[in-house]
Image: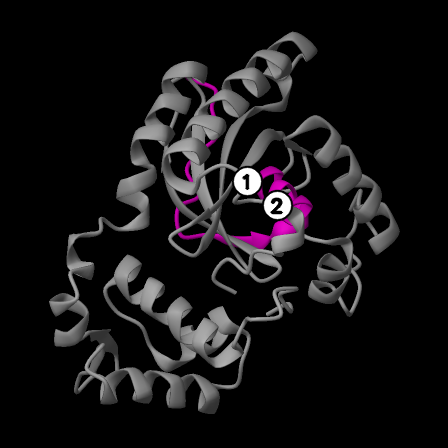
Amino acid sequence: MEQNTNSYRVEAVDRALILLALLAERGRLSVTEAGRELSVAPSTAHRLLATLCHRGFAVRGEDRVYRPGPQWHAAGAREVPPLPDRMRPYLESLYGATNETVHLMVRTGSEVLFLDGVEGVRSLRVGLRIGVRMPAYRTSGGKAMLADLDPDAVDALHAGGLPPLPGERLHDLAALRRELDAVRRDGFGLNQDESEPGVTALGASVGLVDGHHVALAVALPTVRAGADDAKALADGLLRICREARRDLVGTGAARRDDTPAGVG
């Protein structure tokens, strides 16, 4: 997990709050999952979860999986809809505006997790990727979320450099920095055959929603992604992300100097 520039941030508290958000979103969490999302050792994740159990905010089942505890429900957290439910209206609006496959994704460290989606109905379309994880820099929404971060935070997430993959367009950190500069200028990320041959996608960041770094993306076959189509898709995408940010995040909540940690 990258460091936040907020001098008042207490790392252990921050990590515990992220775990609470994950429990609310998923309803269950293993030590392995918690460690992966926080980018910490399983022993550290176990201590954090054990502390939540001690205070009644989590319970550990016989299957060694943690679930929201009685104190969590008593605090009224149960009344907050899960993240996919809160973002679903905007996802459906994006689908209605584009008639293409759309996804909701969250950033987990240097990766993105495709959390929800609506598949297009055209005979030639992009399939759903719900549950799939990919390197953020290879996806449109991932680029948009990385562009929210300070350059130093992006470098820290890719301390080992970018993995050498055949045909990779972004092959080093210098190329990624240039790409993110373009994303900041345009307001959206573009993925042309980078996550999958024959797929073009545009993604824009919503910011932090319930502690998660969130983006929406629209994907279509590359053969259909002309310049005019791309502009229309980008206009609809940016409009709906602005609406979601206004309703769920608030003005100024996605500043780059906030280095949002998402769930990773």
> What is the secondary structure assignment of the residue under circle 1?
loop
Left or right, residue 175 beside residue 135: right
Q: Where is residue 156 in the image (x, y as percent from the top left)?
A: 73, 66
Left or right, residue 209 beside residue 146: left
Q: Which residue lies furthest to the right in this view?
A: 174
164 in magenta? no
Q: Mark number for residue 255?
A: 2
Q: Where is residue 143 in the image (x, y as percent from the top left)?
A: 65, 43
Q: Where is residue 168 in the image (x, y as percent from the top left)?
A: 78, 46
Q: In which quarter of the image is residue 26?
A: bottom left
Give the crowd class for mark 2: few <14, some 14-19, many >=20 residues within 10 Å: some
Of 157 and 102, which appears nearest the observer?
Answer: 157
Left or right, residue 54 beside residue 189: left
Residue 172 visible somewhere in the drawing: no
Three-letter amino acid code at the position of disc 1: Gly
Label 2 near label 1: C-beta < 8 Å? Answer: yes
Q: Mark number for residue 252?
A: 1
Q: Is residue 156 above or below residue 186?
A: below
Tell me the quarter of the image containing the N terminus: bottom right
Three-letter amino acid code at the position of disc 2: Arg
Q: Mark number for residue 41?
A: none
Rendered residue at 57%/23% (across/down): 221
Give the crowd class for mark 1: few <14, some 14-19, many >=20 residues within 10 Å: few
Rendered residue at 71%/35% (across/down): 183
Q: Where is residue 54 in the image (x, y as percent from the top left)?
A: 24, 89
| Magenta segment | 123-148
State the separation of the CA atoms marked 1 and 2. Answer: 6 Å
Left or right, residue 169 beside residue 57: right
Rendered residue at 22%/77% (across/down): 57
